[in-house]
Amino acid sequence: MYEFMIGQVESVYPDAVILETDGIGYYIYMANPYRFTDKIGQDQPVKIWLYQSVSENDIRLYGFKSQEEKTIFLQLISVSGIGPKSALSILSLDDHAGLVQAIQAEDNTFLMKFPGVGKKTAGQIILDLKEKLPKVLAELPSSDLFKQESLNIQVSEQVNSPFLHELEEAMASLGYSQREINRVVKNADFTGVTTTAEAIRIALKFITKPK
């Protein structure tokens, strides 16, 4: 079984990246693979943590930017009603500290913002992982989970800014339509936001509020 793989990013797709190593290209499903767009064609190797799923008719590789992200994924798919696809949708938020905090705070509303997560499933996530997840993460040899990853992109009021482009790609990977994305970009208030993770939180809050 693979633990991680080091190679060069050859292509990025809405649900995966192709990582080339030793002349072989691996199709690796990921949460928000657009995080690796700037790595395409670069000589600098990328390390991706892996989980291999084997079923009767399919073998898939799921990839993660960090060991912490992989650990959260494994805990999520241990919950009844959460499969790999739903787990990746949840991880697409990219604010893993916020996710852990929401589970600890029993914030059903936060969890129900993700595609495929209803009230029952959100409750099951909280029941199964509220106590367990923080303990499992604390046991990792090294963890930078709660260090905010800034993309160093300044907020721009222009719809075609790089910052909003990252937001649009992240929302698309979460399953939102272009119409919904356009409504968020046009109407949500991103004042003071400095990272894509913050922008996605605001976008999800905006898109799920009563009209």
Image (tube, rainbow, N blue to C red):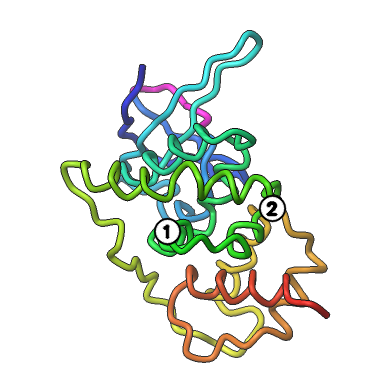
Q: Along the line of sight, which residue is nearer the eye, 94 or 110?
A: 110
Q: What residue is at 66 percent from the left and 57 percent from the top?
A: 112
Image-quadrant location for residue 181: bottom right
Label 1: how many Cα within 10 Å (few below 14, some 14–19, many 20+): some
**Residue kind at label 2, given as amino acid type:** Lys
Q: Which residue is mark 1?
A: 104
Residue at 53% across, 30% down: 27
Q: Nearer the viewer, residue 3 or 120?
A: 120
State which quarter of the image contains the N terminus.
top left
- Locate residue 17, reporting x and y percent: 51, 40
Q: Is residue 97 above or below residue 137?
A: below
Three-letter residue code for mark 1 = Gln
Q: Is residue 25 magenta?
A: yes
For the residue carrying disc 2, how many other residues have a C-alpha within 10 Å: few (<14), some (14-19), or many (20+)? Answer: few
Q: Residue 94's x, y, as percent?
A: 46, 58
Residue at the far top: name it. 56
Q: CA distance from mark 2 to mark 1?
A: 16 Å
Residue 52 in picture, x, y percent from top left:
46, 22
Looking at the image, which is closer to me, 57 or 127?
127
Q: In the image, which residues are magenta?
A: 22-28
Label 2 sits on residue: 119
Q: Main secondary structure of the magenta part?
A: strand
Residue 13 percent location from the top left of the image: 60, 44
